[in-house]
Protein backbone atom coordinates (compact mmCIF):
# COMPACT_ATOMS: atom_id res chain seq x y z
CA UNK A 1 0.00 0.00 0.00
CA UNK A 2 1.55 3.29 -1.13
CA UNK A 3 1.15 6.22 1.24
CA UNK A 4 0.44 9.85 0.45
CA UNK A 5 3.26 11.58 -1.38
CA UNK A 6 3.78 15.27 -2.04
CA UNK A 7 6.09 17.22 -4.29
CA UNK A 8 8.21 19.19 -4.10
CA UNK A 9 9.44 18.84 -0.52
CA UNK A 10 10.70 22.42 -0.34
CA UNK A 11 10.13 25.47 -2.49
CA UNK A 12 11.26 29.08 -2.47
CA UNK A 13 9.27 31.72 -4.35
CA UNK A 14 9.11 35.50 -4.41
CA UNK A 15 6.12 37.66 -3.65
CA UNK A 16 3.68 37.89 -6.55
CA UNK A 17 4.70 34.61 -8.14
CA UNK A 18 2.48 31.57 -8.61
CA UNK A 19 3.09 28.07 -7.25
CA UNK A 20 1.70 24.59 -7.88
CA UNK A 21 1.99 21.85 -5.29
CA UNK A 22 1.22 18.21 -6.04
CA UNK A 23 -0.19 15.32 -4.07
CA UNK A 24 -0.66 11.64 -4.84
CA UNK A 25 -3.32 10.08 -2.67
CA UNK A 26 -3.14 6.71 -0.99
CA UNK A 27 -4.27 3.81 -3.15
CA UNK A 28 -8.04 3.39 -3.06
CA UNK A 29 -8.77 6.85 -1.61
CA UNK A 30 -11.12 9.15 -3.51
CA UNK A 31 -10.93 12.28 -1.38
CA UNK A 32 -8.10 14.75 -0.97
CA UNK A 33 -7.94 17.59 1.55
CA UNK A 34 -5.38 20.37 1.67
CA UNK A 35 -4.23 22.14 4.82
CA UNK A 36 -1.92 25.07 5.52
CA UNK A 37 0.24 24.90 8.64
CA UNK A 38 2.03 28.04 9.77
CA UNK A 39 4.96 27.67 12.12
CA UNK A 40 3.83 26.77 15.64
CA UNK A 41 0.18 26.41 14.61
CA UNK A 42 -2.14 23.53 13.86
CA UNK A 43 -3.09 22.77 10.26
CA UNK A 44 -5.86 24.93 8.80
CA UNK A 45 -8.28 23.48 6.27
CA UNK A 46 -8.02 25.01 2.79
CA UNK A 47 -10.37 22.83 0.72
CA UNK A 48 -11.33 19.28 -0.07
CA UNK A 49 -11.85 17.47 -3.37
CA UNK A 50 -14.05 14.46 -3.87
CA UNK A 51 -14.27 12.75 -7.25
CA UNK A 52 -12.76 15.77 -9.02
CA UNK A 53 -15.18 18.30 -7.50
CA UNK A 54 -14.53 20.80 -4.72
CA UNK A 55 -16.31 19.46 -1.67
CA UNK A 56 -15.92 22.27 0.83
CA UNK A 57 -13.64 25.21 1.43
CA UNK A 58 -12.10 26.88 4.44
CA UNK A 59 -11.49 30.57 5.00
CA UNK A 60 -8.96 31.09 2.22
CA UNK A 61 -9.13 33.61 -0.66
CA UNK A 62 -9.86 32.59 -4.27
CA UNK A 63 -6.19 32.83 -5.22
CA UNK A 64 -5.96 29.42 -3.53
CA UNK A 65 -7.37 26.95 -6.02
CA UNK A 66 -7.12 23.26 -6.68
CA UNK A 67 -7.73 20.36 -8.97
CA UNK A 68 -8.30 16.66 -8.55
CA UNK A 69 -7.57 14.29 -11.41
CA UNK A 70 -9.32 11.05 -12.44
CA UNK A 71 -6.65 9.04 -10.61
CA UNK A 72 -7.54 11.11 -7.48
CA UNK A 73 -4.18 12.87 -7.34
CA UNK A 74 -4.46 16.59 -6.69
CA UNK A 75 -2.85 19.98 -7.16
CA UNK A 76 -2.93 23.09 -5.03
CA UNK A 77 -2.33 26.35 -6.88
CA UNK A 78 -1.62 29.64 -5.20
CA UNK A 79 -1.51 32.83 -7.26
CA UNK A 80 -0.06 36.22 -6.35
CA UNK A 81 1.97 34.83 -3.48
CA UNK A 82 2.21 36.85 -0.29
CA UNK A 83 4.79 36.65 2.47
CA UNK A 84 2.15 35.18 4.82
CA UNK A 85 1.72 32.23 2.46
CA UNK A 86 4.99 30.86 3.80
CA UNK A 87 3.97 27.65 5.53
CA UNK A 88 3.91 23.87 5.40
CA UNK A 89 1.24 22.68 2.97
CA UNK A 90 -0.22 19.31 3.83
CA UNK A 91 -2.26 17.01 1.69
CA UNK A 92 -4.43 14.28 3.24
CA UNK A 93 -6.30 11.51 1.47
CA UNK A 94 -9.27 9.55 2.70
CA UNK A 95 -12.31 7.54 1.71
CA UNK A 96 -15.38 9.70 2.04
CA UNK A 97 -17.56 8.51 4.86
CA UNK A 98 -18.88 9.65 8.19
CA UNK A 99 -15.69 9.32 10.21
CA UNK A 100 -12.96 8.39 7.82
CA UNK A 101 -9.35 8.67 8.87
CA UNK A 102 -7.28 11.15 6.91
CA UNK A 103 -3.81 10.06 5.91
CA UNK A 104 -1.37 12.92 5.62
CA UNK A 105 1.62 13.33 3.38
CA UNK A 106 4.91 14.79 4.63
CA UNK A 107 4.04 18.23 3.30
CA UNK A 108 5.65 20.85 1.09
CA UNK A 109 7.53 23.63 2.85
CA UNK A 110 6.94 26.89 0.97
CA UNK A 111 8.98 29.98 1.66
CA UNK A 112 7.90 33.26 0.07
CA UNK A 113 10.52 36.02 -0.01
CA UNK B 1 -16.83 24.77 13.53
CA UNK B 2 -16.15 23.26 16.93
CA UNK B 3 -13.19 24.79 18.72
CA UNK B 4 -10.82 22.57 20.69
CA UNK B 5 -8.65 23.68 23.61
CA UNK B 6 -5.58 21.80 24.82
CA UNK B 7 -2.67 22.52 27.15
CA UNK B 8 0.28 23.97 25.26
CA UNK B 9 2.68 21.39 26.64
CA UNK B 10 2.95 18.36 28.91
CA UNK B 11 5.81 16.29 30.19
CA UNK B 12 6.02 12.62 31.04
CA UNK B 13 8.57 10.01 31.96
CA UNK B 14 9.26 6.98 29.84
CA UNK B 15 7.05 3.94 30.54
CA UNK B 16 4.59 5.99 32.57
CA UNK B 17 0.99 6.64 31.49
CA UNK B 18 0.12 9.98 29.93
CA UNK B 19 -3.30 11.61 29.96
CA UNK B 20 -3.72 14.35 27.36
CA UNK B 21 -6.88 16.42 27.91
CA UNK B 22 -8.97 18.26 25.36
CA UNK B 23 -11.93 20.57 25.75
CA UNK B 24 -14.44 20.71 22.89
CA UNK B 25 -17.47 22.26 24.53
CA UNK B 26 -18.98 23.52 21.25
CA UNK B 27 -18.85 20.20 19.44
CA UNK B 28 -22.06 19.19 17.70
CA UNK B 29 -23.79 15.89 18.31
CA UNK B 30 -22.65 14.36 15.04
CA UNK B 31 -19.01 15.47 15.08
CA UNK B 32 -16.46 12.81 15.78
CA UNK B 33 -13.44 13.49 17.99
CA UNK B 34 -10.21 12.58 16.27
CA UNK B 35 -6.72 12.65 17.68
CA UNK B 36 -3.66 13.05 15.50
CA UNK B 37 -0.03 13.47 16.39
CA UNK B 38 2.76 15.15 14.49
CA UNK B 39 6.43 14.32 14.81
CA UNK B 40 9.01 16.89 13.73
CA UNK B 41 9.25 17.33 9.98
CA UNK B 42 6.35 14.96 9.31
CA UNK B 43 2.68 15.26 8.49
CA UNK B 44 0.08 14.47 11.17
CA UNK B 45 -0.50 10.81 11.93
CA UNK B 46 -3.89 9.39 12.95
CA UNK B 47 -4.04 8.08 16.52
CA UNK B 48 -7.65 7.33 17.42
CA UNK B 49 -11.21 8.60 17.05
CA UNK B 50 -14.61 8.23 18.71
CA UNK B 51 -18.11 9.63 18.92
CA UNK B 52 -19.61 8.80 22.31
CA UNK B 53 -18.10 5.62 23.69
CA UNK B 54 -14.58 5.10 24.95
CA UNK B 55 -12.29 3.57 22.35
CA UNK B 56 -9.12 1.51 22.46
CA UNK B 57 -6.61 0.64 19.78
CA UNK B 58 -3.02 -0.53 19.67
CA UNK B 59 -1.70 3.01 20.00
CA UNK B 60 -3.89 4.55 22.69
CA UNK B 61 -7.23 4.82 24.45
CA UNK B 62 -9.76 7.61 24.11
CA UNK B 63 -12.02 8.49 27.01
CA UNK B 64 -14.95 10.71 26.06
CA UNK B 65 -16.94 12.56 28.71
CA UNK B 66 -20.61 11.69 28.94
CA UNK B 67 -21.59 15.23 27.88
CA UNK B 68 -19.01 15.09 25.03
CA UNK B 69 -17.58 18.45 26.04
CA UNK B 70 -14.18 16.98 26.74
CA UNK B 71 -12.05 13.94 26.04
CA UNK B 72 -8.75 12.47 27.16
CA UNK B 73 -6.18 10.63 25.09
CA UNK B 74 -4.40 8.01 27.14
CA UNK B 75 -0.99 6.64 26.25
CA UNK B 76 -0.63 3.68 28.57
CA UNK B 77 3.17 3.52 28.58
CA UNK B 78 4.93 6.49 27.03
CA UNK B 79 8.03 5.84 24.98
CA UNK B 80 10.55 8.30 23.58
CA UNK B 81 8.96 7.78 20.16
CA UNK B 82 5.70 9.21 21.53
CA UNK B 83 7.25 12.66 21.85
CA UNK B 84 5.22 14.77 19.42
CA UNK B 85 2.55 17.46 19.13
CA UNK B 86 -0.84 15.88 19.82
CA UNK B 87 -3.90 17.42 18.21
CA UNK B 88 -7.45 16.92 19.31
CA UNK B 89 -9.71 17.69 16.37
CA UNK B 90 -13.38 17.75 15.63
CA UNK B 91 -14.37 15.94 12.49
CA UNK B 92 -17.22 17.81 10.91
CA UNK B 93 -19.50 15.26 9.31
CA UNK B 94 -22.18 17.77 8.36
CA UNK B 95 -23.26 17.39 4.77
CA UNK B 96 -20.48 16.02 2.62
CA UNK B 97 -17.63 18.16 3.90
CA UNK B 98 -15.54 16.04 6.20
CA UNK B 99 -12.91 18.52 7.28
CA UNK B 100 -10.76 18.37 10.38
CA UNK B 101 -10.61 21.44 12.60
CA UNK B 102 -7.27 21.59 14.41
CA UNK B 103 -6.27 23.66 17.43
CA UNK B 104 -2.70 24.40 18.42
CA UNK B 105 -2.11 21.00 19.99
CA UNK B 106 -0.14 19.80 23.02
CA UNK B 107 3.61 19.34 22.79
CA UNK B 108 4.40 16.14 24.68
CA UNK B 109 7.92 15.73 26.00
CA UNK B 110 8.94 12.26 27.19
CA UNK B 111 11.90 12.06 29.55
CA UNK B 112 14.11 8.96 29.57
Image (cartoon, coloured by chain):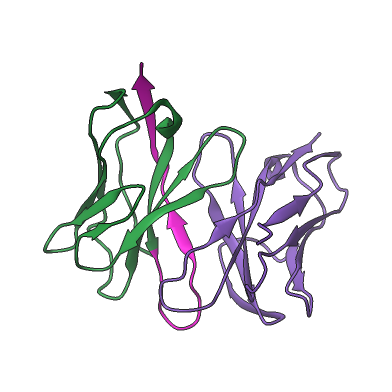
Chain colours: A purple, B green
Kindly indicate the quadrant of the structure image that contains residue A83. Answer: top right
Is residue A36 a member of the stretch shown in magenta?
no
Whole-percent x, y for residue B70 in the image: 20, 54
From the viewer's perspective, is B59 left or right of A28?
left
Relative depth, front residue between A18 and B62: B62
Instruction: Please say if A8 is above or below B53.
Output: above
Residue B1 shown left or right of residue A40 in the figure: left
Q: Nearer the viewer, residue B11 or B90?
A: B11
Indicate whether A18 appears above or below A62. Answer: above
In which quadrant of the rendered image does the N terminus of chain B lie? bottom left
Percent x, y of residue B89: 38, 55
> Any magenta on residue B93?
yes
Coordinates of residue A74 in the picture (x, y in percent) = 75, 67
Q: Residue at x 68, y 82 (%)?
A: A51
The extreme top residue here reads B112
Instruction: Name the residue furthest left.
Output: B66
Total tally of numbered discs in the picture? 0
Q: Which residues are magenta?
A: B91-112
Quarter of the image for the C terminus of chain B: give it.
top left
Q: Nearer the viewer, residue B30 or B63?
A: B63
Taking the spot 62% from the left edge, 72% from the top edge, the residue there is A29
B10 lies left or right of B83: left
Q: Residue A33, percent across and down?
A: 61, 65
Q: Which is more toward the observer, A104 or B13?
A: B13
Q: Is residue B99 above or below residue B81?
A: below
Residue B3: quadrant of the picture: bottom left
Amino acid sequence: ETGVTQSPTHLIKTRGQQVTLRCSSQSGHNTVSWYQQALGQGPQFIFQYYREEENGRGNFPPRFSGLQFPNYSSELNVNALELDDSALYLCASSLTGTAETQYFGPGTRLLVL
Amino acid sequence: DAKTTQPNSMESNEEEPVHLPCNHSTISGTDYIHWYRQLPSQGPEYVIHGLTSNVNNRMASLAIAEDRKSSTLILHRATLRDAAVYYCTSHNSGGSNYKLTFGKGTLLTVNP
